[in-house]
Structure formats: C-alpha cells, structure tokens
Image: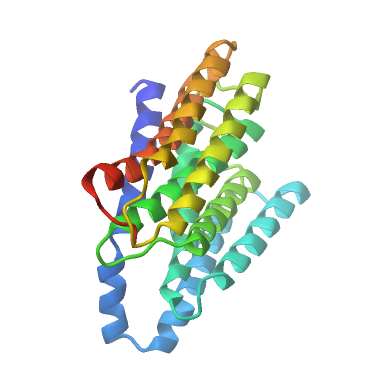
C-alpha cells in the first residue's frame, strides 16, 4: 500500500478516536452508577501508568539518557494533567490516557512522511488541534459541556503522548523517505497565525456559552487560512506537504462548529 495512503488511514483513525472520546459520556455515566467512586477516582491513574509501562516494556533495548529524559518529562506532564480537572468532574482525568493514545496514533500517521524533531513537533500540533475539536464538539453535545480547563487537559495528554513517542523512538523505523527538517519561514508564519486564530476562537466561544455563537468568531480562522496558503504555497515544502496540509485542514475545520452554531442557532453548553 502506498505510504501516503497508509498515513491517511492512520490519521483518519485518530479522528475516529477523537469522535469516540466525545461520545463516551454514556459509558462513564454507567460506570458512575455501578462502580464505587473510589475506584473511578484511581482508574485514570492506573490506565495512564499502564500505557506508559506497556510502552517501556515494548522496547527491545535499554533507553539512552536523552530518551529517558523525554520519557520522564512525559510522565511529569501526564501527572500534572491528571491533577488539572475539576474535582467535581473526575471522569475528565480519563482524557490523559485517551490523548496519550491518540498522540501515538497521530505519530504513526506522520511517520510515513517525517521523522526526528519534525515528527515530534507536528505530532504535538496536530494532536493538539484534535484536542481542541474534542471540546468544541462536546459543547454541542446535549449531555456535555465546553470548558477551557478540559481543553488544557486534552493538550497535556497529547503533549505526554508526543514526548513518550519521541523518547521511545516509536515508529521511527518506517520505510520512508521522510524529512527531519522542522520549519521554514512560511510554515512558522502559518502556524503562528493559526495558533492565534484558534485561541481567539476558543476564548470567544467560552464567553458565549449558552448562546448561539456569533459569526465573527470564524473570521480569524478565515484570515489564517489565507495567510497559510499564501505563505506555505510560496515555499519549497514538498516533503512536508501531506503533514502541513493535515494541520491546515484540521485547524481550518475548527471554524465549522461556530459556523453551524451560527447558521443553525445551536448553543454551546
């Protein structure tokens, strides 16, 4: 199977995972009814530790000091993320192991195109955007609500999974003609503009909770898309085309939620 197709299938799997996470509320509601609270409190910690231990055991060689440093940083980030959720909604802690797994799936998808630090950074960027999508879609779910703290938890999960993958050098043996180059001027400009646009979007939606999101909130994303096309298309980034295109697509798609909220008069809970 062509490498581009394999990468697309894995990237599609990451999107499916994100949608599963959004719609997993009923599972947790059921667990709250049948399982003692003390067990639910520790379950995310156990699953997170299990994921990290399983990845460490998967290695056939002893990690080098630099790799150990990345893994240690990943453990610290995961631990902080597990402590971030509201004490009244402890189920949010499960987002840490969920997004560790999602980050690894994204890393697998991108490994057909890039490697090294490029793989590290693009995994974090694309995984982070998917974490933003989780909360945006959750805000439209009749039984869920949108929260900036929860979005931060998703990002911490992605960051932990991204560092784990890099530290353990997962999927770096893929047969590909990948590049380890990280940036050029056009890519840096595009990423920065999109980052600002997404921040404006998520912060503004928070101030319109319970109301139909106004149409102006998608304007920064439209501007970012124009800047991205002008700056990136003018650069020689052929080897990164699939990766940058994926980031562009996911980042631009964040405009879809306020757009549908605006046109269909939906509300962010």
Foreground: 165 or 102? 102
Asked if residue 160 is positioned above or below residue 30 in the image, the reply reads above
| Viewer-closest of 156 and 193 | 193
Residue 65 falls left or right of residue 116: right
Q: Is residue 221 above or below residue 71?
A: above
Residue at the image position 42 percent from the left and 38 percent from the top:
218
User: Could you tell me residue 190's position as x and y percent?
Assistant: 58, 27
User: Please, which residue is most extreme toward the left here?
Assistant: 264
Residue at 45 percent of width and 25 percent of height: 245
Q: Outermost residue, right direction? A: 65
Residue 21 seen in this snapshot: no
Q: Horizontally, is 91 left or right of 148 in the view? A: left
**Residue 121 horizontal/vertical position (percent):** 61, 38
Looking at the rendering, in which quadrant would you find the N terminus? top left
Q: Is residue 22 left or right of residue 232?
A: left
Q: Nearer the viewer, residue 28 or 168?
A: 28
Image position, residue 253 (x, y; %) = 38, 36
Q: Quadrant of residue 235?
A: top right
Is residue 125 visible in the rendered structure shown here? yes
Question: x, y percentage for residue 60?
Answer: 59, 49
Above or below, 106 against 40 in this view is above
Query: Looking at the rendering, which quadrant does residue 115 occupy?
Result: top right
> Quadrant where the C terminus lies?
bottom left
Which residue is depicted at the point 62% across and 67% down?
A: 80
Q: Residue at horizontal 30%, vertical 79%? A: 31
């Amino acid at each position: 199977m062509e490498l581009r197709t394999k990468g697309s299938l894995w990237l599609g799997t990451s999107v499916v995972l994100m949608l599963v996470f959004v719609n997993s509320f009923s599972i947790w509601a059921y667990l709250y009814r049948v399982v003692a609270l003390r067990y639910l409190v520790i379950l995310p910690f156990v699953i997170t530790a299990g994921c990290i231990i399983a990845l460490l055991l998967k290695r056939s060689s002893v990690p080098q000091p630099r790799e150990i440093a990345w893994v240690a940083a990943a453990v610290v980030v995961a631990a902080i993320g597990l402590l971030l959720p509201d004490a009244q909604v402890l189920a949010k802690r499960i987002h840490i192991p969920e997004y560790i797994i999602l980050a690894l799936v994204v890393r697998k998808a991108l490994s057909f195109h890039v490697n090294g630090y490029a793989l590290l950074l693009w995994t974090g960027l694309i995984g982070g955007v998917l974490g933003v999508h989780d909360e945006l879609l959750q805000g439209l779910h009749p039984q869920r609500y949108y929260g900036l703290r929860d979005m931060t938890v998703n990002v911490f999960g992605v960051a932990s999974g991204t560092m784990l993958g890099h530290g353990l050098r997962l999927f770096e043996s893929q047969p590909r003609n990948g590049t380890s180059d990280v940036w050029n001027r056009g890519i840096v400009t595009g990423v920065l503009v999109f980052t600002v646009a997404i921040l404006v979007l998520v912060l503004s939606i928070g101030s319109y909770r319970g109301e139909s999101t106004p149409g102006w909130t998608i304007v920064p994303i439209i501007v970012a898309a124009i800047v991205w096309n002008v700056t990136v298309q003018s650069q020689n980034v052929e080897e990164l085309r699939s990766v940058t295109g994926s980031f562009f697509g996911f980042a631009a798609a964040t405009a879809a939620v306020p757009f549908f909220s605006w046109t269909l008069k939906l509300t962010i809970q």
